[in-house]
Image: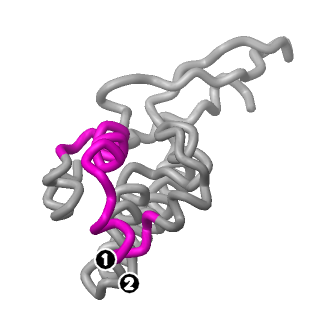
């Protein structure tokens, strides 16, 4: 991309920061150029966030229908997968899958719930009730 063609569409972060792009100057040499945002990139991010919102809502419904424990909801809310949650909690993936069963979740010790709560940055009570700020 030529430096003169660096997109300057005001994106979601355009008011806070600028992005650095490697572009070519008038002599064809690579230089850096600053951009306030790019509409195509902003649209792609919007689609990705819509997908995440759908996953969060699906997880919420599963918990409300007693098909999954709140661990699934908070995992989706914090944009984690089993591997990441396993790494942060120290639980095996199969253990987390087991903890996602509502009957098993209800029998978890306070220490295990606290490990999940710490990772999700909520209290144990918020973990149990799914009553946490979603921002």
Q: Measuring 47% from the left and 68% from the top, which residue is drawn there?
A: 51
Q: In terms of depth relative to the viewer, which is nearer, 4 or 89?
A: 89
Q: Nearer the viewer, residue 128 or 74?
A: 128
Q: Which residue is mark 1?
A: 63
Mark on residue 52?
none
Magenta span covers which residues?
99-123
Q: Is residue 121 magenta?
A: yes
Secondary structure, mark 2, is: loop
Q: How many marks?
A: 2
Residue density around tag 2, few if under 14, some if 14–19, many if 20 or more, within 10 Å: some
x then y, percent, for residue 115: 35, 41
In the rendered view, tell whether residue 2 sits above or below residue 28: below
Instruction: Decide: is 97 above or below 114.
Output: below
Q: Provide residue 4's location: percent of width, then percent of height.
A: 63, 26
What secondary structure predominates along the stretch shown in magenta? helix
Between 36 and 59, which is closer to the camera in this rendering?
A: 59
Viewer-closest of 135 and 61: 61
Element type where label 1 sits in the image: helix
Q: Quadrant of residue 106?
A: bottom left
* Residue drawn 30% across the image and 65% down it: 107
Where does the image place residue 119, in percent across and percent down from the top left?
A: 37, 39
- Left or right of 77 in this view: 93: right
Quarter of the figure with residue 62: bottom left
Query: Is residue 128 depicted above or below 63 in this figure?
Result: above
Q: Is residue 5 above or below residue 132?
A: above
Q: Is residue 22 left or right of residue 16?
A: right
Q: Residue at x 64, y 33 (%)?
A: 5
List the single residue furthest toward the right.
Answer: 28
Instruction: Report which residue position mark 2 lands on.
Output: 67
Q: Position of residue 83 (x, y in %)?
A: 61, 49
Contact between marks 2 and 1 (CB within 8 A): the answer is yes
Q: Residue at x 58, y 21 (%)?
A: 20
């Amino acid at each position: 991309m030529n430096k003169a063609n660096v997109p300057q569409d005001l994106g979601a972060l355009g008011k806070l920061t600028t992005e650095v792009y490697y572009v070519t100057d008038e002599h064809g040499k690579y230089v850096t150029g600053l951009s306030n945002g790019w509409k195509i990139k902003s649209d792609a991010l919007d689609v990705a966030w819509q997908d995440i919102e759908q996953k969060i809502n699906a997880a919420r419904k599963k918990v409300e229908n007693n098909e999954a424990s709140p661990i699934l909801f908070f995992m989706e809310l914090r944009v984690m997968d089993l591997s990441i949650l396993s790494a942060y909690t120290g639980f095996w993936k199969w253990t987390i899958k087991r903890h996602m069963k509502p009957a098993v979740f209800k029998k978890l010790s306070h220490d295990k719930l606290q490990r999940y709560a710490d990772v999700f940055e909520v209290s144990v009570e918020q973990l149990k009730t799914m009553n946490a700020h979603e921002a």
